Image: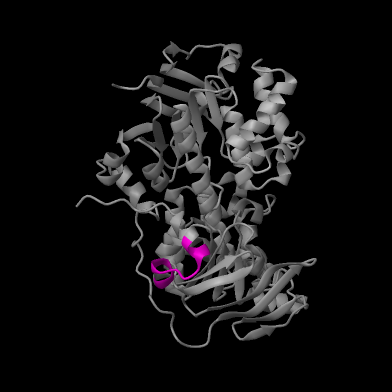
Amino acid sequence: MNSPVLLSVSGLSVEYTTRSGVRPVVRDVSLDVQQGRVVAVVGQSGSGKSTIARAVQGLLPENGRVTAGQITIAGTEVTGLSAGEWRALRGTSIGFVPQDPLGSLDPLKRVGDQVAEVLIVHRLAGRRAAHRRAVELLETVGIKEPARRAADYPHQLSGGQLQRVLIAIAIAGDPALLIADEPTSALDVTVQQRILNLLDELRRDRGLGVVFITHDLALAEHHSDSVVVLHEGHVREAGPTTTVLINPQAEYTRQLIADAPALSPDKYARAAEAPAGEPILQVTDLVKRYGDTPVLDGVSLKVQRGTIHALVGESGSGKTTAARVLAGLTTFDAGQVRVDGVVREPHRALDRARQRAQARILQMVHQNPLASLDPRFTIGEAIAEPLRINRIGSRADRRLEVTRALDRVGLPASLAERKPGEISGGQRQRVVLARALVLSPPILVLDEPTSALDVTVQAQVVDLLIELQRDLGLSYLFISHDLSLIRQIADQVSVLEHGRLVETGPVSHVFAAPSAPYTQRLLDAVPGAPARAA
């Protein structure tokens, strides 16, 4: 016997009116979500996933409208509801777990008040009872010391705790249907696993129907019953998850699978052993403290010339601090740093001359390309800035180098006149790479360079990084919490836990037989690759 259908979307089309005209975003999309079942909606950025999520909650922006089709929730057609009628449904019939917890929570309100607000607004409980229920809900979603945490403000909680708060808010009104829009994209692999396991548990216990929106096919494979594959607003393929992902029929689905690191672990052939010789980058017994707290505690690692050495660990493990020390952006308290034979000692900041010299040897590529680029500068000015600071070449020479740098990362020269806000996330990441390479350094420190990108754009950037590394003989220290990606691309790996190095060695050895329990926990949290049809 089939379970009741909680959400039925039939022939849905949505368009946005922009300054450049009318833009269709979703075209003739249909899907059903049954009680106790999870439907994953997958596709790259711009495919229409989040627009569907907004449409089924009556949350389209003012310039968006449904132009065709029907949305039915629990047997009631809701497409033409007024704003007030939609407000009555949201929180009680439909719960929503958004992508960005910090951007979704009021920074000036206590966490418990924000959970209780759902109950108060929908008159499900009085103020005092709502606050008691809020504490119970925080406990339900696995927050320790819920009464104490209810009195905290969002900035006092970790990313995983904040995501649990959003889930508590989503289920507070006891909805039958849950919309989860990329609920774990910004989280470490272990936290991601705990959040998705929590959603699975809530689905089983409460009989929830879930729309799981994601660009990560490995997560869809492990946490959904059926899949709808979107591309440019159209459904390219739909069906049971095991059928679609093990034996995909659409070329677009096959490409998404090929782009997903967890589903294509052998995409790149990497060396099993590090080459011999003097390492190009080496840290020995590195210690960095903030106050009395050691953030890095006796860390030693070597990056061999021409290799990709991964540095992995959860948030707070010290990865980014290590990167900043290596890049000369912060001092260290003990140990030694050697960059291409040049030794740096503790407590000494780089003077201007040494900063310029280091910039020619090592460049750091930060996690957020938009934050790394001055919005007032054109792309050409941003790429030329290292040349200008180091007084290299004339203005005409620098323009030529900018063109070469753009070509090296696969971008047209015409992009030089545009501003960072006028290009896509994948293009911005390429611009940041072009800027890092314009001084021809032999070493790049890459701090989560693809974490903000969807799987298709990530694959394009990673392909570029591999190509550049091979063509230019570059050495990478690649910092990431994505162990699926590290398994694909890295030669060597070092694992940090709370500022201590717990394991290091060839990726093939460490991933096959980890010696540290912490490494094993990280690997256990990585979605496995399903069997493939011949």
Of the pair 266 and 392, the residue shown nearer to us? 266
Q: Is residue 370 left or right of residue 351?
A: left
Q: Is residue 428 above or below residue 517?
A: above
Percent position (x, y) of residue 441?
Answer: 57, 74
Of the pair 49 and 274, the residue shown nearer to us? 274
Residue at screen point 45% across, 50% down: 457
Q: Residue 444 in magenta?
A: no
Q: Is residue 8 left or right of residue 105?
A: left
Percent position (x, y) of residue 209?
Answer: 43, 27
- Whether residue 34 is visible: yes
Q: Residue furthest right?
A: 291
Q: Residue 513 in magenta?
A: yes
Of the pair 8 and 521, the residue shown nearer to us? 521
Q: Is residue 38 above or below residue 444?
A: above
Secondary structure of the magenta portion, mostly? helix
Q: Is residue 274 above or below residue 427?
A: below
Q: Residue furthest bottom?
A: 277
In which image quadrant can residue 47 be found? top left
Residue at screen point 34% across, 49% down: 257
Q: Which residues are magenta?
A: 509-520
Residue at screen point 77% across, 75% down: 349
Percent position (x, y) of residue 102?
Answer: 66, 41
